[in-house]
Each structure stands twice: as C-alpha cells, then as structure tokens.
Image (cartoon, rainbow, N blue to C red):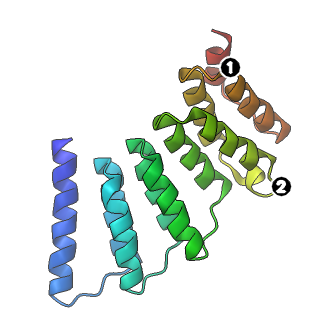
Amino acid sequence: HAPRTRSLQQALGTYKRMCSMGVEPTEYTFRALLTSCVNAKAPEHVQGILQEMGLRGQPLTQRSLRTALYACRLAGDAQRARGVLREHANAGVAPSGTDLALFALALVAAGEPGAAAGVMRRVLRHPDRGAEVDTEVCDAVALRLCEAGEWRDALTVVYLMRARGKAASVVVYTQLVT
C-alpha cells in the first residue's frame, strides 16, 4: 500500500498548495481526491473531503456518493459508508440501487452479511432502485454472501435478481452449488 498511500498524500498536498495559491477547487478536484482515496483504500479521508466540498460550495453529487461508497467498500468500512450515505441524504442526494449495493458490499466486508442481505432485499424489491441496480454489483454481493457462509441470503439475492430479469453469473451459480 505504500505507493498508493504516497499517491494519496501527494494528492492531498497538491490540493492544499492549490488552495493556498488561491485556486478554487472544482468538482473535478474533489473527484480526483476521492478517487485517490479509492486507490489507496483509505476511506478515513472520504468524509473530510466531502465536508470540504460543502465548505467550498461544491454540492455533493451522485458521483461523489458512488466514489465515496466504493472507497468504503474496498476498505470494508461499514461505519464510514453509513456516514457517507447520511451526508448525501442530508444534501438531498438519493442513493441509486447500485449505490446501495455498494453499501451492501461494504457491510459484507465489515462482517455484517445479515445487514447486507437486508439492504439487497429492500433494493431488489424496490420498483425503481431494483430496476437500476447493476448486475455485476449484485453478483459481487451474492458471491461475498456465499464466502461468508450466508447461502440462504445469497440465494435470495439471486432469486430477486431473476425476478427483475437479471441473470446471475455462472460464477455465482457455481459457488452456490459447490
């Protein structure tokens, strides 16, 4: 992780220098910082960056939500993922089905597979969010539930995917039968 962490530190340093020179950060600046957090698997910086966006007059967006959730997912940090969802909800940014599935992945990675399965059940049963959720992310949730030994929950996710007209991958089915 050393090169990735170093890259994040460089990005944060560049941001501070940029601000000290009077250059106003844009949405793209903050997106680059959030992406650096993803690459470094460092969700501990995500909420600070989101708060800085607000202080600088940059609105939270669907893209900032997804990037922040992805960072939390990679690090298995469900607590920070909850905070990210809360901050975006307070800013009027509603999570998509795929965003909530990323949240479910963060829950599984943090050792909360039951909570993840509950999120996926609600997402896939929702008339709008269930239709928009990405099949690959659903597959990933089902696989992670299998790995956690939550076979019934994984089968439920696959069943709800099928009810939505989404087919789980062969990898998911193979994992379920082995």
Vertical arrangement, residue 58 with respect to residue 111, above or below? below
| Res. 62 image quadrant | bottom right
Task: Tell me which numbered mark, 2 or 1, is placed earlier along the sequence.
Answer: 2
In what element is the residue under mark 1?
Answer: helix
Q: Which labelled disc corresponds to residue 173?
A: 1
In what element is the residue under mark 2?
Answer: loop
The answer to whether residue 28 of the structure is visible from this angle is no
Q: Please, what is the three-letter code of the amino acid marked with disc 1? A: Tyr
The residue at 59%/28% (across/down) is 145
Residue 163 coordinates in the image, percent (x, y): 85, 37
The answer to whether residue 91 of the structure is visible from this angle is yes
Q: Distance between the residues labelled 2 and 1?
A: 25 Å
Vertical arrangement, residue 169 with respect to residue 98, above or below? above
The residue that label 2 is drawn on is: 127
Residue 37 coordinates in the image, percent (x, y): 32, 56
Q: Please, what is the three-letter code of the amino acid marked with disc 2? A: Pro
The residue at 61%/40% (across/down) is 116
- Left-right relation of 25 to 129: left
The residue at 36%/52% (across/down) is 38
- Name the image quarter holding the N terminus: top left
Residue lying farthest to the bottom in this orientation: 22
Mark 2 and mark 1 in contact? Answer it, CB < 8 Å: no
Q: Which of 21 and 87 is in front in this view?
A: 87
